[in-house]
Image: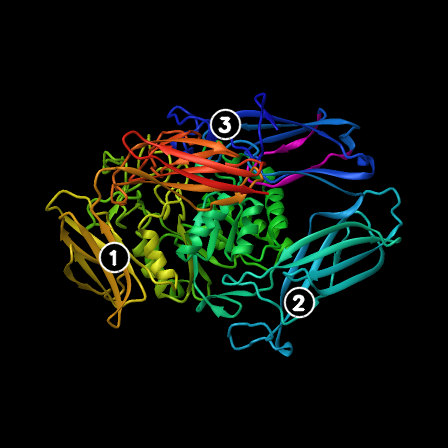
Amino acid sequence: MIQNGEKLTLPHDWSIEGKFDEKNPAKSEGGGLPTGTAWYRKGFIAPANFKDRLITVEFDGVYKNSEVWVNGEYLGKRPYGYSSFSYEISKFLKSGKNMIAVKVDNSAQPDSRWYSGSGIYRNVWLTSTAKVAIKEHGVFVKAGFVSGDFGESTDGGNLKPGQAVGFVAPQVSFINKSVDKTKKYKIEFSVLNKEGKHVANYLIAADVLEDNTGKNVSSLLISQPEIWSVERPYLYTLLVKIIDSENKIIDAQSTTFGIRRFNFDAIKGFSLNGKPMKILGVCLHHDLGALGAAVNVRAMERQLEIMKKMGVNAIRTAHNPPAPEFLDLCDKMGFLVMDEAFDMWAKKKTKNDYHLNFSEWHKADLEDMVKRDRNHPSIILWSIGNEIREQFDSTGIAITKELVKIVKNLDNTRPVISALTETKAEKNFIYQANALDIYGLNYNHKLYKDFPKNYPGVKFLATETTSALETRGFYDTADTIRRWPKDGKTKFTAGNKEWSASAYDNVSAYWGSTHEETWKEAKKYDHVSGLFVWTGFDYLGEPLPYPWPARSSYFGIVDLAGFPKDSYYMYQSEWTNKPVLHILPHWNWEKGKSVEIWAYYNKADEVELYLNGKSLGKKSKQGDDLHVLWNVNFEPGTLKAISRKNGKEVLVREVKTAGAPAKIELIADRKNIKADGKDLSFITVRILDAAGNVVPNADNLVDFKVEGNGFIAGVDNGFQASLEPFKANYRKAFHGLCLAILQSTEKAGTIKLRATSAGLSPSSIIIKTRK
């Protein structure tokens, strides 16, 4: 693609390449980066047989107000920046070279409450099919279990292979643009297992396929099916073929799916495959930190890997449809998904947001989301909106009913939800529509206990919780809980010169609560189906509570660079079965200062703390405690914690007083990556003292040099108020850490990264790239 006369590769986000500036019209709420208008152009050669084919250009997402031309012919406009859409371009093509042009207009600002990115930031596809073909997103796979007589567990127990017979019931829509409408075809349906073996087949006899026809197939049965679950996300493939009268395959489409069942219950909460479980979720915005909004599969996979290790089993796509590749990853990695359509309806949240387009475009945008995403086994909920203003307006009743109907007409296998904030039923017009399947409540954790009494028979999910504020590696007073800001009207003055929020879990936004406050309530009650914490990662924009130069959020359990904050280990100790012991803070303080030491742990009865070999006592969690603590007067040396169960040692953790910065250490998340021009290696840069300890307050400027078959795709350090560019060959460390992201070229070989800093011993690392 060509943008501003320069050759570039899609997906592309031009905003992330710009400079942070308070004067940028997106403001700090939008990340403080430039927006504007741009043109993309690409020349391509039409297929030799294009006159006999249907040629379609498909966009996974363009932010925003895209307009598309082919050879000067106008195809249309798509305002919503998160929708996938397509145009059939066959009649506009010519022999030889053709030109597609895309105008992207993100100039009207502010238009978002978070960083949106700008440009063709998701993938684009050129598709060629026969004139008789399966429609785009024309295959819908309904899959589940046959009941009772076929041996399915009926006692609520966990389904296992051999206990059930699975069914697959495809629905397929076709398109017929051929001249001869009388030709007859056969449609073959095949179900393949993970190894590619056919486990079910069905053939529809000769038939005339008229344009826009659909076919429903009675259930294909699979004996002893493999079940999709969060622990073992097994995927099948449905292969649909159109076969002509000469027995030639003229079109084929494969779709992955999973066989699973789930249920929400007003009393018992959520279950998957008959097994009760709590939805342990986080909300994620779509940006990828230093890479911006441009889709990169490895960057998304890394985020999900980090969440998985924390114990997360569910993702809410806040507050818009995600990239299709993100849902593919959730299918493969075993995450449940709440797929969300809108952050606003007809009533605005920012001056130039989607409210301007809702009336004309909501039906198409919602339909396209459901049709595109409905085969993903990871998706268990359709969300029609987040904190919608029509909660407080009687128009909310009609709009809610309409949106739910749109979803149910396309998929009646999943419940529909909306994330609500108005807690009084008589004042909540979205709730009064009586159309939602589940009550989704944002925040208000103190209302969890009495929900069954106040809303008898209503299913409940905490759709957004917490909004705790933390800066990785920053620690101040831990003994009081603070709400920053204290309300929505008072100017915030309670911060600090470091533009930071304490990494002790004791600060939240005024509408929210700390991580521990929220989880203590959610874990108590079976009727709470689960929760989605705001947020898994920090994200660009919405830097509450601080004004400029803060430009990214403080809400994440993990910072923007992908480095966990301390609360990560609280969740890990609660949400996983692996042994955990984590102590905080660092051990570099003024002599004699009283420091509060916290320990998160599990799989143990107690933790004993030592300072320079002297025991400071044993502590055990009491009641609903989620950590233990000691007040310790600082003296240099080694702080050591030992967790024990029945007197036997489980884990040992040490934190040592670090000396002056002396050297750089480079650690790659992967040392072997693909030479495909897209794959990434995330290099953690640590500033160490002479003994190898991370220096907790090191802020050394690190310079990077790359040689070989790769380049620096971005740099970061996780500090929410850093105005250093993401596209650079340098970065200051923040609390001892920073990050360099290496991206491969399409040539196999090696990438060598060298990191230097004045007064420190340098470090190098080599990444291999392979075809």
Q: Which mark is residue 167?
A: 2
From this viewpoint, which residue is outermost toward the top? 5
Which element type, helix, strand or loop, lies under badge 1? strand
**x and y, in percent, of residue 554 in the image:** 34, 42
Q: Earlier in the sequence, mark 2 or mark 1?
A: 2
Judge from the rendering whether residue 193 lies leftward or rightward of residue 113; answer left or right: right
Label 3 sits on residue: 108
Q: Taking 184 as reference, is 165 above or below it?
A: below
Q: Earlier in the sequence, mark 2 or mark 3?
A: 3
At label 3, the amino acid type is: Ala
CA gap, disc 1 to disc 3?
Answer: 48 Å
Q: Residues within 10 Å of mark 1 (few under 14, many from 20)?
A: many
Quadrant placement of the N terminus: top right
At label 1, the amino acid type is: Ala
Along the viewing direction, whichever of 558 and 737 lies nearer the viewer: 737
Which residue is drawn at the image coordinates 34% and 65% (left, top)? 524
Q: In which image quadrant can residue 227 be found?
A: bottom right
Quick check: is 81 in the magenta stretch? Answer: yes
Q: Which mark is residue 599?
A: 1
At label 2, the amino acid type is: Phe
Quick check: is 46 in the magenta stretch? Answer: no
Along the viewing direction, whichever of 650 and 557 lies nearer the viewer: 650
Q: Residues within 10 Å of mark 2 (few under 14, many from 20)?
A: many
Q: Taking 620 as reference, is 506 above or below it?
A: above
Residue range highlighted in magenta: 73-90
| Nearer the camera: disc 1 or disc 3 | 1
